[in-house]
Amino acid sequence: MVKVDKLVKNYGDFRLDISMEIPDGTVTGIAGKNGAGKSTTIKAILGLIKPDEGHVTINGKEASMLTGKEKESIGAALSDSGFSSYLRIEDVICILRKMYPTFDEDFFRKNCVLQRLAFDKRIKDFSTGMRAKLRVLAAISHKSELLIMDEPTAGLDVEARNEILDMFRQYLLDNEKRSILLSSHISSDLEGLCDDIYLIHDGKIVLHEDTDTILSNYAVLKIDDDTYEKLDKSYILGTKKEHFGYACFTSEKQFYAENYQGIVIEKGNIDDLILMMTGGR
Amino acid sequence: MFGLIEKDLRLTFARKQTLLIFFIMALVMGISMDGSFIVGYLTMLAAVISIGTISYDEYDNGFAFLMTLPFGRKTYVREKYLFCLIMSTAAWCIGAVLYFIGNTVRRSGVNMVEELPMLIALIPVMYLSSALMIPIQLKYGSEKSRIALFILFGCIAVLIFGAKTFFSSMENPITELIQTIENLSPTVILLTVITVCALASGVSYMLSIRIMGKKEF
């Protein structure tokens, strides 16, 4: 269980101020625009930065105080950091073997072959997709119970992204107690994998909801100016002025479907969520 | 810890060509120059190369990922000091063997056993110089640490020059000290050097732990 309790971190004008929980056996997503505070949150959870206020605990222990042994149960992949690019996969295997007693070398080698990662090539000669796959493989190959992934699919094409998401699915299938914390600004990645999603904007959590609820109850209402004036706005989370009138984001699609005949209701997705909750009026 | 040593060894030997060039240079200089130059040169070189692994860790924001691996910040620092010691000692052994072979081939008549304490003293002295560089490298990073080292060595040079000028203008107590040291047995000198270097390295280690503890990635 990961608990982020009133975490505050200041960087000049930017202030991250959040609380969140990742229970065992769940896949939690962090969505948000670039610069919203996703990576800062991940870094705080990994103990890479020190909170100015508040606490981050993993299984009840302060994240920055975790021992090497305790860190063995965590697998991490960061978008902008990995093994030295001067190393080859053969080197990485030898290092991981010594670092993690639970390192599954057969699994790692097999998956490197499947993902077409050359063993004798330096990482610096790998493509962006190959590097991303290697980062994820290194994180999941030591039977960790918690995966913390910062933008693991950023900058990848659809095929590479799907391959990485499949790796996560396989990782979860192997043990149902495993948890993943995943940050991404690619909505389809989060929709297809996460049980619940935190939406961060300007360093604050603006929404926390189950993914199923977002996909079933949330919607975008497209209405003209007159209808907008008469609309019951109790369940409207965000509004955006459009050329036809207004686009309103709601968490109660059914309410508006039943009470406002004839308005256009588009099924909500995480992209709408991000746009309407962070960019709308 | 072993994983970190493995990583550093692999990063070091990733530069096989550079290492080979350094080794050939050492061989050429060792053959062409008399004395124990080759031993000191190789030991110093190994220490510098060991410190270079911090730059590799830092390169491409690598520190952030490295610190998610299963070890603490203290272990990282401890490993760097240990790795430097292992590398310096290994290089010293190679240098000593080459020196011995050189002396045997040249039939220079140098008594290796008599020279051994002074040769061994090279390890703590060279190690100390690298130990002093570790906190600077951790604090300022590979780019800024070059400037920091330049300033540090500049200050040391000024201090030495200043002390020389100061003592030459008065009755020199240093001469007496040097004479006392010369009268000491090589073993005592060696033990003193080891003790002083160990203490200074200890201070450097504590400083590095503090710097690493405060670092954010």
Image (cartoon, coloured by chain):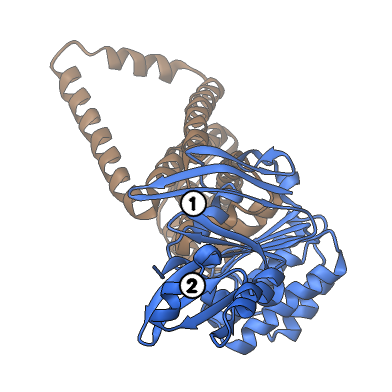
Disc 2 to disc 1: CB gap under 8 Å: no
* Mark 1 surroundings: few (<14), some (14-19) or many (≥20) residues within 10 A: some
> Is label 2 or label 1 in front?
2
How many marks the image carries: the answer is 2
Q: Which chain is brown?
A: B
Residue B200 position within the rendered picture, expressed as x and y whole percent measured from the top left: 47, 28
Whether residue A126 appears in this view of the structure is: no
Q: Secondary structure at mark 1?
A: loop
Q: Residue B125 appears at what percent x and percent y?
A: 47, 36
At which x and y percent is residue A255? 63, 72
Dot 2 amino acid type:
Leu
Q: What is the x, y in percent for residue A200?
A: 51, 60
Residue displayed at 70% across by 84% down: A115
Say left or right for B203 vs A12. Answer: right
Query: Which of these two is toward me, A261 or A101?
Result: A261
Q: Are marks 2 and 1 on the same chain?
A: no
Q: Colour of chain A?
A: blue
Which residue corresponds to mark 2?
A231
Position of residue A31 in the picture relative to residue B52 (left or right): right
Disc 1 residue type (three-letter): Phe
Q: Chain of mark 2?
A: A
Kindly identify which residue carries mark 1.
B217
